[in-house]
Image: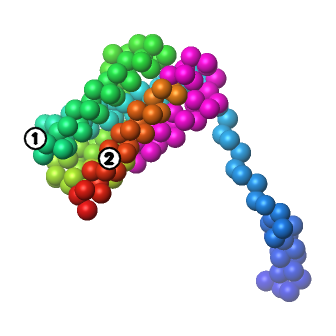
Amino acid sequence: MTIPALRALTMALLAILPTGGAAAQPAPEPPPISAYSYARQAQSVDALVRAASNALLATAPDAELTRLARMLETDHGRSAARFGRWTGGAAEPQLLGADARRLRKLERVVRERQDDELLEELIEIHEDALALHEAYARSGAHPDLRRAAALAAPAVAGHLAELRRLEAAQN
């Protein structure tokens, strides 16, 4: 690259970078998702966690993981039913593509009894679910579904706290 070209590139970069005194602008909030899309995503996460919980229960894990799996199965079953009315009331919600891939990984982790990796995966799933519920509660398109999201977020946060507690206890 020639010197004039490097100068031009440097000037162009300086023009688009924030100045030292100016604060960087926060990333804009993503556009709100439709009520159907949100409910469909929430149901997919519920189906994923329920399937993982059932796989975990089938392996006869220790008492702590059994208690956790039963709690997740019950709570996510209720959640799936709550969001079902927004997606046509499907009795067994279908997993979306990314959640189907996550389930295959979770099933392998459960089969191989990799409890630490299982907890890591469940924590990541619940972090994503919490972000989904909080975002819809904040800026969702439908008021009733925003209230449902606001109710779901604390339950997911509780699961997340319990998962982190178990993860810390195993380390």
Q: Give the class, few, some or many, for how many residues have Cα within 10 Å of label 2's Cα (few <14, many ≥20).
A: many
Name the residue located 23 percent from the left edge and 37 percent from the top edge: 69
Tag 2 near tag 1, CB within 8 Å:
no
Residue 143 magenta-highlighted = yes
Location of residue 109 in the rendering, given as x and y in whole percent from the top left corner: 23, 50
Q: Give the class, few, some or many, for how many residues have Cα within 10 Å of label 1's Cα (few <14, many ≥20).
A: few
Location of residue 43 in the rendering, given as x and y in whole percent from the top left corner: 41, 27
Element marked by disc 1: loop
Find disc 1 in the rendering and name its residue: 60
Residue 33, visible in the rendered structure = no
Element marked by disc 2: helix
Amino acid type assigned to the residue bearing label 2 in the image: Leu
Q: Main secondary structure of the magenta part?
A: helix
Q: Which quarter of the rendered picture does the N terminus lie within?
A: bottom right
Find disc 2 in the rendering and name its residue: 163
Q: Is residue 115 left or right of residue 149?
A: left
Q: Which quarter of the rendered picture does the C terminus lie within?
A: bottom left
Residue 88 magenta-highlighted = no
Location of residue 111 in the rendering, given as x and y in whole percent from the top left corner: 16, 47
Q: Tell me the quarter of the picture where residue 68 sits.
A: top left
Image: magenta residue range: 124-148
Q: CA distance from mark 2 to mark 1?
A: 18 Å
Q: Nearer the viewer, residue 111 or 63?
A: 63
Q: Nearer the viewer, residue 10 or 48?
A: 48
Location of residue 78 in the rendering, given as x and y in whole percent from the top left corner: 34, 21
Name the residue located 57 percent from the left edge and 31 percent from the top edge: 136
Q: Tell me the quarter of the picture where residue 117 sits.
A: bottom left
Amino acid type assigned to the residue bearing label 1 in the image: Ala
- Residue farthest left in this picture: 60
